Amino acid sequence: MLHIHNVKKNFGQFTAVHSLNLEVERGGIFGLLGANGAGKTTTFRMILGLLTPSQGTIKWNGQELSYKTSDTIGYLPEERGLYPKLTVKEQLTYLGQLRGMKKSHILEAAEAWLKRFQAEQYLNKKVESLSKGNQQKIQFIASVLHKPELLILDEPFSGLDPVNVDLLKEAVKELNEEGMTIVFSSHRMEHVEELCQNICIMHKGKAAVSGHLKDIKRSFGKKNVVVHADFDLMYLTELDGILKHHRFTDGMRFQVEKEEVAHDIFQNIYNKGFVTKFELEEPSLHDIFIEKVGAANE
Amino acid sequence: MQLMSKFWIVLLHTYRNKIKSKPFIISTAITMVLIFTIANINHIAKLFGNDVPDKIGVIDESGVFYPLLQEQVKPLKEDITLVSVSDEKTAEVNVSKGKHEGYLIIKQSSEGLPEGIFKAEDVTKQSSIDDIQNALQQVKNMVSVESLGLSTAEVEKMYAPVGFEKVSLLESAKSEEEANQVYVLVYVLLLFIYMSVMMYGTMIATEVATEKSSRVMEILISSVSPVKQMFGKIFGIVLVAFTQLTVFAGSVYTALQLNESISGKDSMLDILNLGSIPLSLYIYAALYFLLGFFMFATLFAMLGSLINRVEEVNSLLTPLIMVIVGAFMIAIYGRENPESAVVTIASYFPLFTPMIMLLRVGMTDLPFWEILLSFGILLASISIFATIGARVYRGGVLLYGGSPSLKLIKQALLMSKEEKKIEG
C-alpha cells in the first residue's frame, strides 16, 4: 500500500505541502481533490520521487519509490506532453521501453488500447496532427501501457468531451478491477464521487478532509432537502436549522443542519399545496468541498 | 527484467530520431553538394568557359624580340596568347573593340636591350601584366647574357640561389616544411572543432529544450533519471556527429579523388602530404576534439534544460557561443604568435583549452607535462561541468516560467540540492 507519513515540502520560503498523512490501500482507488495550487501535483511528484519531501516519508509497499521501481509505476502528468513530431507508434514504443517493456509487447498492448479507444487509425500518424482529445488518449495509453502496479493520474479528465470522459472512466474502473492501485486528482467532484472509495481534499497544502467517502459524508452531518412544489417555498428559509438555500425553476434545495430539520420542512409544506417532489439527499462532495475549503480559508 | 539499459534507449532514440529527421537529411545533403562543388571548383569554372586566355597585342618595333617573348610566354598558354599587331592604331582599335585585353610595345634600348610599354584600358589587372613583364625580363636576361658572351654553365652559376639553411638549435624543433604543413593542418582542425562544437552543441540544447517545451520531459524523468537522460542525449548526439562527420570526410575524400582523376594532377591531399605530419599530432587533435566536444556538450545540455520555449534557445546560448568564438579568435591570432603570453594563459582556461592547446601542441615545442596538464584540466572541468550540468538539468526540467538567467541556474541548482535522491 501507499503510505504517506507526515510529509512536508518547502520550496525556499514557500511551503507547498504541510504535514500530509495519507494511506492508499493496494488495489484501491484514491481521489485527491483540491483547487489549483492546493499541492496536488507537488504531492504526486513526491510520490513519484521527482521531488524529495523536506520532511516525512512516502513508501509504496514499504519501499521508497526511485528509478529502480519506476517500471511498476504509471504517471499521467497534468501538463500533457508528447513529442509532436513522432508518430503514435514511435512515441508509445519509446515511452514503453523507458518503462522496461519489450518492443513486441508494446506494439501488442498499444494496438489493443488504441482499438479500445477507437483510435487505431492513428497508430502511424504524427501526434501533432491529432486532436487534443486524441492526444490525451495517447497520453493515457502511455501511462498504463506497461501495466503498472501503481497508477498516478493528475487531472485525467480535464479538457475531454463527455464521451471521452466516459471512455477513460470506464478504462480506469476496469484497470482498478484488475488490481491496479490508482491515485488520481481532479477538481470535478462528480468524477471523484463516482470512482473513489477514499478521498482527500487538499487546501493550501494541507489535508482539509480525508478518509472513506461514506464516512466523510456521514460525519459531515449536513444534508440536503430538495422540494419541488407549485407554491412559493421562500418562507421556509425562516426555519431554524436551514443553512443555505438554492432556488431553481420549479423548486428549491435547502442545506440543513441535521436530518431532523428535514422533518420540520416536511411538516411545513405537506398541507400548503401540491408537492411533486420531496427528497432527503446525502451531502454532495461539492458541498463538503465548498464548506471545508471555504472554512479553511477563514 | 532489464532488457536494455535506459541510457541506451535514450541514446538510440535520440540518434535514430535525429538521423531520420528531414532537416538533418537535407542539411547533410546540401553540405555534401557544397563539398563536391568546392573541391572541384576548377573544373566547374572551366565548364562555364570563363577561363579563355587573355589576348595581348604586340607591336615589335625592334623586330627581334617578339619570337623570344613568344617562347617565354608559351608555358602560360592557358592564360595569355600573344598576337602580333602592325601598328598602334590597329592595336588600340582591337582593345576598344574588346578583342584584345591590352597591347605591348617592344622597343630596343641604346644598349640593344628590350624595353616594354604596356597599354590597356585598365592597367590594375595585375596577373597578366606581371606575367608579360616577367617574360620580357627573361628575354632581357637572355639577350644581355648573350651579349656578354657567357657560357650556359656560367649563366647557371650566376642564377643559382644562394645556399641558405635555417637550423633550429632545439633538437625536437620542427623543420620549416613540417611547420608549414602543421600550420595548415592546425587551421583545418581548429575550424573543424569550432564548427562541430557550434553545430552539435546547438543541436543538443535544442533537443533538450524541445523535450522540455513539449512537456514530455515530466514523463521522461518519471521513468529515467535526469542524469541518464542527459548523458544518453549527449552521447546520442555525439553518435550523430560521428555519423555526419564520417559522411562529410568521405565526401571530401571522394571529391578530391574525383578532382584528381579529372585533371590528372596530384590532388590536394597529396600536396598536403598529411602522412608526413607526426602521428602524435593526430592523436592529440582527436583527444582535444573529443574532450572539448564533450565539455561543451554538457554545458549546452545544461543550458537547454533551463529553457521554457524553443525560441529562447538563441538568447540563452549566446554567451557560450561568444566564448567559443573568442577561443577561435585567439587561436587565429595564436597561429602567428604561438609563443605569446596571451596564448599561453588562454590555453589553461578550460573553455579555451581544446582549441588553444591544440594550437600550441601543433605550432610550438611543448613539454609533455604541459600537454598532460591540459588533459587533466579538461577532464576535471568535464567532471565539474557534468556534475553541475546534471544538477541544473534535474532542477531545470521541473522548473517552468521565468526568463532564463543566472538566477534561474541558481534556482535550478537549489531545487536539485534539495532532491538528494539516489540515482538508480
Image (cartoon, rainbow, N blue to C red):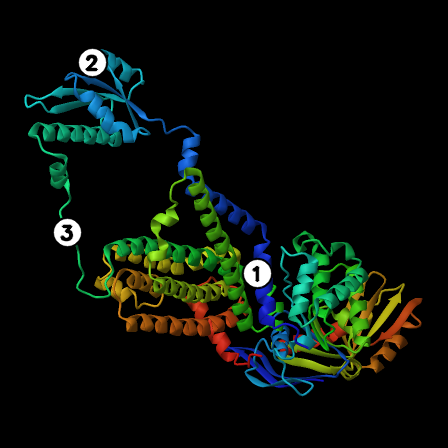
Residue in front for this viewpoint, B277 or A5: B277
Alpha carbon separation for disc pair 3 and 2: 47 Å
Q: Give the SS element for disc 1.
A: helix
Q: Nearer the viewer, mark 1 or mark 3?
A: 3
Where's residue B209, x and y in %?
Answer: 53, 61
Q: Give the SS element for disc 3.
A: loop
Q: Which mark is residue B15?
A: 1
Where's residue A261, x and y in %?
Answer: 83, 80
Q: Mark 3 and mark 2, same subunit?
A: yes
Q: Is residue B53 visible?
A: yes
In the image, what residue occupies the spot 17% across and 22% down?
A: B65
Where's residue B421, x and y in %?
Answer: 55, 81
What subunit carries mark 2?
Answer: B
Q: Is residue A273 visible?
A: no
Where's residue A96, x and y in %?
Answer: 68, 68
Per the image, the residue denoted by label 3 is B164
Q: Give the SS element for disc 2.
A: helix
Alpha carbon separation for disc pair 1 and 3: 56 Å
Residue in front for this viewpoint, A236 or A171: A171
- Count of marks, rendered view: 3
Q: Earlier in the sequence, mark 3 or mark 2?
A: 2
Per the image, the residue denoted by label 2 is B88
Bin the neighbour count of mark 1 within 10 Å (Cα to Cα): few under 14, some 14-19, many 20 and up: many
**Where B153 sits versus A236, above or below?**
above
